[in-house]
Amino acid sequence: HLFGCAMDVLYRRLGIDAAYRAAGGMFYTVESHVKHFAEAKAGDALYVTTQVLDVDDKRLHVFHRLHRRGDDTLLATGEQMHLHVDTTSAKAAPADGAVRQKLEALRAAHAAFPVPRDLGKPVGSRAKR
């Protein structure tokens, strides 16, 4: 749920709002991999960072990290692939040009961040974080 909330924040930053959705555009999650590393307790203050890894006309690849505020413990990661859909035709379609430009700017800025160690690892892999 927290990674979904992080996507909602990203969507708002990109201009993907009620009007954008009403015009028939939206990204949908087509693949997601979540890994849990530590436990959060009720009342813990948490935060999520989102790294835009890649983007093209129809796809958006992101990597989330969930941390506990205070000690910055990494609690979980979530890698997601989203597909842009024209909801009126129910088919994959290119994102709005302005949205795509904002995503490309984020991808370029985020390229300076380290590549996540767990990127692309399938369920059951023995890779260490």
Image (spheres, helix red, strand yellow):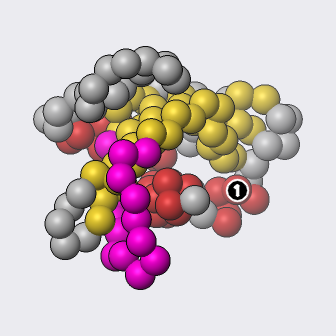
Per the image, label 1 sits on a secondary structure element best described as: helix
Residue type pointed to by label 1: Arg
Looking at this view, is 98 or 5 the one in front? 5
Looking at this view, is 15 or 31 the one in front? 31
Q: Quadrant of the N terminus?
A: bottom right
Q: Is residue 126 left or right of residue 11?
A: left
Q: Is residue 89 left or right of residue 1?
A: right
**Residue 59, above or below 121:** below
Q: Report if residue 8 is visible in the image.
A: no
The question of residue 46 being in magenta is answered with yes
Q: Is residue 23 left or right of residue 38?
A: right
Q: Report if residue 110 is visible in the image.
A: yes
Q: List the residue tagged with mark 1.
A: 21
Local crowd size for mark 1, using a 10 Å CA cut-off: few (<14), some (14–19), many (≥20): some
Q: Residue at x 66, y 47 (%)?
A: 26
Which of the 4 quarters of the picture holds residue 95? top right
Segment tinted magenta in the rendering? 36-51
Q: Residue at x 32, y 20 (%)?
A: 127
The question of residue 13 being in magenta is answered with no
Q: Residue furthest right?
A: 89
Q: Residue at x 30, y 59 (%)?
A: 67
**Residue 59, above or below 110:** above
> Residue 89, percent across and down?
85, 35
> Residue 125, percent across and down?
43, 18
> Residue 102, percent across and down?
38, 46
**Residue 110, above or below 11:** above
Q: Residue at x 46, y 77 (%)?
A: 42
Q: Quadrant of the C terminus?
A: top left
> Residue 44, percent across and down?
36, 76
